[in-house]
Each structure stands twice: as structure tokens, then as C-alpha cells.
Amino acid sequence: MRYLPYVAVGGALAVGAFLVLFPEWDRPPLVAENFGPAGQELVALKDPRRVIPYNVIPAALPAAPAGGPLAKDVYRNVQVLGDVPAAEFDRLMVAITQWVAPKQGCGFCHNLKPGADGAVNYADDAMYTDKVARRMIQMTMKINTDWGNHVAPSGVVCYTCHRGENVPPRVWYKQPTPEHSGILGKPRDWQTNARMIRDFFPTAGNQQWLVDDEDANLASNAAMVGERGSGVAAEQTAESLYVMMMQWSQALDANCDLCHASRALQSWHESTPYRMDGLWGQYMTQDINKNFLIPATNLFPRNMLGQVGDIGKVDCYTCHLQHQKPLGGYNVIEHYGILAPKGVSAGPDQGLRDIMRPTEVIGPAYDPTAKVVEVSIPAWPAPAPVASGAVPTVKGVQVGPAVVTPTGEQTGVTPARIGAPVSTSTEGTPGPVVQPPVDRDATPDDGKPPMKPIDPSTGKAP
């Protein structure tokens, strides 16, 4: 017993040292962005001193001279950018080299070995990276042209994903099916050899909702529905959705209430406008994975594929890298407009984007011109005034809970005065009656999105 005080002191010191050295603490002051009505504590906290890897804004190259011959008239085998001026084409090639292969240079995509005439044949497609780069340029132009509802006004360029690396730092692959473990059943497909918690979780949810577009409406609105009742999801499906949502939260460095109402996560009527923006992003990601990346699998050598032979695919983390807007909202497309031939426009949903901005920002000043982006503060114009109690409407969809103020003479039960006796019966002496609340919303809140985005190139929902 005489050693007990020493053991207690040693244990306390060990616990104290662990708490000081190992957790990642954020030292005040923090930047607080209030993105909801006052009093609801819809706040995102940012540490302005934290430097997030891969979030350095690249310097824009000097503008190319205007005019001049077209690229297709100067170079051979220019299949995608042939109709842009050759000077602008050359400028973009230099930028792509800096964005994707700063160490390897032009030789990452082109065979720089001189031919018999002593000249380098840049039109040679012998290297697989040349074919992949051409496909990725087409993908970038498609995103800027058709998915402005999610990427406007900043747009995307190759650097948005690659950040100076040959392969984007954050992509995901399918995982091999775990072997059956006998009486214990099939184990979860955890990546037990992962070095980061993000890589530990299964990627099944990404396959289900970022490629296959399965129904994510897993919450039941009825109590006691039974094991096989409608709306009850399989345990592993619910787990996969939860894991994917946690990945999204980490990708944007935001809590669940950035998009969801904490009292009813499935409810679209009570969600913030950011949830609709996230829906656009989900369908854009499906378009990228299904129509550009997966079809390009046969272009890659086996050593560039995953464990089951699939190509690396994208999710929210690929572009966002712990920012609500990639690179803090830095407008990359204004310097490289040839990657957005028709411009980057939010289209008919501009009204939704206008209200997606912090209503109040408290904390250290934010410098948007800093080389390292630390805090994302949207710079969109202020929305048009909205009448008190009204709800923003986007394409006929109400976003958020409505506050209805009756107009004109009302009929019904007289409301009870504070302190007055309340009766739940209509018999006997007339008096105030407590009526149960009635949901007068004509649209059932079934947890499904109020609409699906339309792919402008096809006129159909993805």
C-alpha cells in the first residue's frame, strides 16, 4: 500500500503527457462561421494557423499572346484542344506539367527520345499517360461545362485533384472480399494494414453511392416496423452509409449539421441549402467515375491499378482535401479559360448558391491571397432580401423549415393564455382546447431528395 501514492502520481503524469503530446489540439482563437439562423448554433470552426497538406495555390502563368495560328495547324495529333490558339495551348501544356508531373516534366506523357531526324515526336501516342491526359482534359472540360451547379464559380483544373502529384493524393479502390472465418461468419472488409484512419474503413459505400447510385434512404419514419418491415436497411448497408458520411465530413472538415438537421438527419425539408449542393456533387462524382475513370481502366498498366484490378476513383476528399470549397474557393478557371469553353455557370440554381454563405464570421482576418489556403469563406454576392418567415425556393423546392404566419381572420379554438387552465375535452364549460400539431406540408417528408439534377449533355438524370 505504501507504493500506491507513487503509482497514482506516475499514472496521472502518464495520462497528462499523453493528453498533451498525442491529440491534435487547436489553440484559440478560432474562426467561427455561422451558416444558419441566429441561435441555432449552426457553426463551423476553423483553425487559421493549421496548414493542411496539398493546399498551396499554384501561381498562374503569364497570359499567352492573343491571336496567332490554331494548335491543330501547328502540331499534329491534337485531338481535344485543336481549336485553341497555339500559344494558349503551349501555356496550358506547361501548366499541366507543373500540376501533374513537376519532377518528370514533359517526359511524363511524351517520348522525348529523338527520332531518326533528330527531332522529338510529340505526336507519338506510345506512352499510356498521353492517352490518359487527353481523356482527363475532356473530363475537366465536361465538369466545368455541365456541372457548374457544384463547381461554379471557381471551376476545376487538373491541379484541383492532382496537387503536384502524378496520381491525385486521395483516390479510392475496391477492396478484396474478406475470406470467410467459419463459425464467426464473414468479417468486415476493414483495411487492417492501413496507416491512416481514412484508409482503414471499407470503400463499399463509395461503390454503392458514388458509382452505382443505390437508394440511400435508410432511415424509417415508422416505429416498431419489425425486422423485415419496409424502410429497414440491412445492418451492413447502414454501416456503409455511415462510414461514407464520415468520410464526407472529414473531406470538408465540417460537422453533420453543415447539411443536416440534427433532429432529423433524413429530412430534406429541414436540411440546409448545402445538402442540395452536396447532392449535385454526388451525382457529378458518379458521372466522373462511371463515364470517365472506369472506362479508362484499360489504358493503365497493371501496376497502376488496385488490388482487384480497378482504377483509382474519386470521392469528395479528392478535390476538397479538408476544405468546404477546394483551395478555399480560389478561382482557378479564370486563369485557364480554355478548360471551360462555355464558361462556368451555376445555371438555374444560382439562387441556391447565393444563400449558401456564412451569415456571420468571427475570428482572425482571412487573407484570400495567401499562398496557403487556411480558411474557406465564400465570396458570393449577398442574396436578394427574403420576406420574413419565407423560405428560399429553388426550382420549386423549399429548402429549410417554413415559418407560416396566418393572414386574415382565423377560425378555430381560442389559444390558451399563459397561466390559464387548459382542458383537453370539449365537453362542459367552453374553454381553450389543446390541439395536436398537424403537419400541413403537402409533400411527404420521406427522406428522399426533392429532385435529381439533370445532366445538361443528355437532358436526363444520371
Image (cartoon, rainbow, N blue to C red):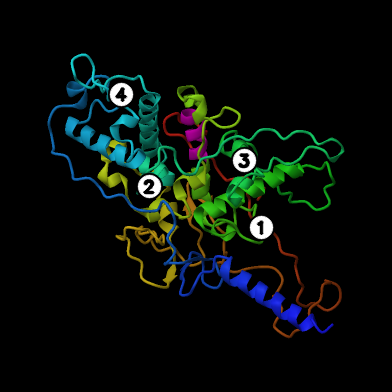
Q: Is residue 163 above or below residue 84?
A: below
Name the N-terminal-most of marks 1 and 3.
Answer: 3
Q: Which mark is residue 264?
A: 1
- What residue does disc 3 label? 203
Residue type marked 2: Ala
Query: Where 124 sits versus 256, above or below?
Result: above
Reading the image, the residue beneath label 2 is: 152
Tell which tag, 2 or 4, sits nearer the viewer: 4
Mark 3 lies on a secondary structure that is: loop
Which numbered disc, 1 or 2, marks the residue closer to the eye? 2
Residue to which mark 4 is pinned: 111
Q: Position of residue 216 (x, y in %)?
A: 65, 43
At mark 2, the secondary structure is loop
Report the mark closest to the observer, 1 or 4.
Answer: 4
Q: How many neighbours does mark 4 have within 10 angstroms: few (below 14), some (14-19), or many (20 or more)?
A: some
Q: Position of residue 26 (x, y in %)?
A: 51, 69
Q: Residues within 10 Å of mark 3 (few under 14, many from 20)?
A: many
Q: Rounded to the nearest whole Å, what is the CA distance between mark 3 and mark 2?
A: 28 Å
Measure the alpha-carbon separation of dots 1 and 2. 29 Å
Q: Residues within 10 Å of mark 1 (few under 14, many from 20)?
A: some
Q: Which residues are magenta?
A: 283-294
* Type of the residue with mark 1: Ala
Q: Position of residue 244 (x, y in %)?
A: 61, 46
Chain-order first, disc 1 or disc 4: 4
Q: Could you tell me which residue is drawn at 35 percent across and 35 percent down?
A: 141
* Residue 409 versus residue 250 in the image, above or below: below
Q: 210 and 152: which one is in front? A: 210
- Real-space Cα separation, disc 1 to disc 4, in angstroms: 57 Å
Q: Earlier in the sequence, mark 1 or mark 2?
A: 2
Q: Does the residue at mark 1 contact the one at mark 4 (Cβ under 8 Å)?
A: no
